[in-house]
Amino acid sequence: QVQVVESGGGLVQAGGSLRLSCAASGGTLSIVDMGWFRQAPGKEREFVAAINWSGGSTYYVDSVKGRFTISRDSTKNTVNLQMNSLKPEDTDVYYCAAGRRELTNFNYPSFGVYDYWGQGTQVTVSS
C-alpha cells in the first residue's frame, strides 16, 4: 500500500517563502505522477500543481504560476513545492497526492485522477 507523507508547512509572512516536501513509500513502482492540492475549512479541495514522472511535465493553477515551482526526484519518490512570494490567500492545508495514471492537459486538476493522499500540512501566511 502506497503511503504519502508531507512535510515543510508552517507560518510565514506575506512575501516570504516555504518549501513543502512529499515522500511516497510502499508499492511506488505504480506511481507515475504526484501533485499538490490545498483546502480551506468549508471549501472544496483545490488543485495547485502536479508533475509527471515521465518527461517531467508540470501543471499549475493560474493563481500560483510564476510563484510556485514543483519538482521531483523520481529516484527517491519525492516531490517538492517551492512557494515564493506567498500571499495571505495561500493559507490552507496542503495535501500531497500520488497517481497511477499519466497526467494530461485535461485530467491533471481532477481530484479523482490521484489515488493516494497524504494527511496534509498547514501553511499559514500572515499579512
Image (cartoon, rainbow, N blue to C red):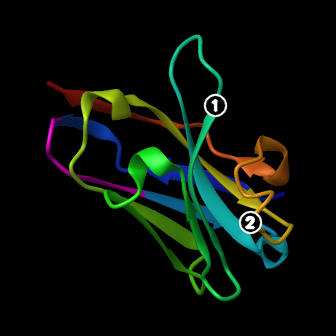
Across and down, in percent, residue 16 comes to: 15, 47
Taking 85 as reference, is 119 above or below it? Answer: above
Q: Amino acid at mark 2?
A: Asn
Which residue, given by chain and number where applicable, does mark 1 sit on?
45
Q: Circles 1 and 2: CB distance less than 8 Å?
A: no
Identify the residue at horizontal 64%, vertical 54% (top origin): 4
Viewer-side label of 1, 2: 2
Answer left or right for 74 relative to 91. Answer: right
Which residue, given by chain and number where applicable, does mark 2 sit on?
105
Quadrant holding the C terminus: top left
Quarter-of-image position of residue 14: top left
Q: Which residues are magenta?
A: 13-20
Identify the residue at horizontal 35%, vertical 42% (top origin): 9
Q: Amino acid at mark 1?
A: Arg
Residue 19 among magenta residues: yes
Identify the residue at horizontal 24%, vertical 55% (top origin): 84
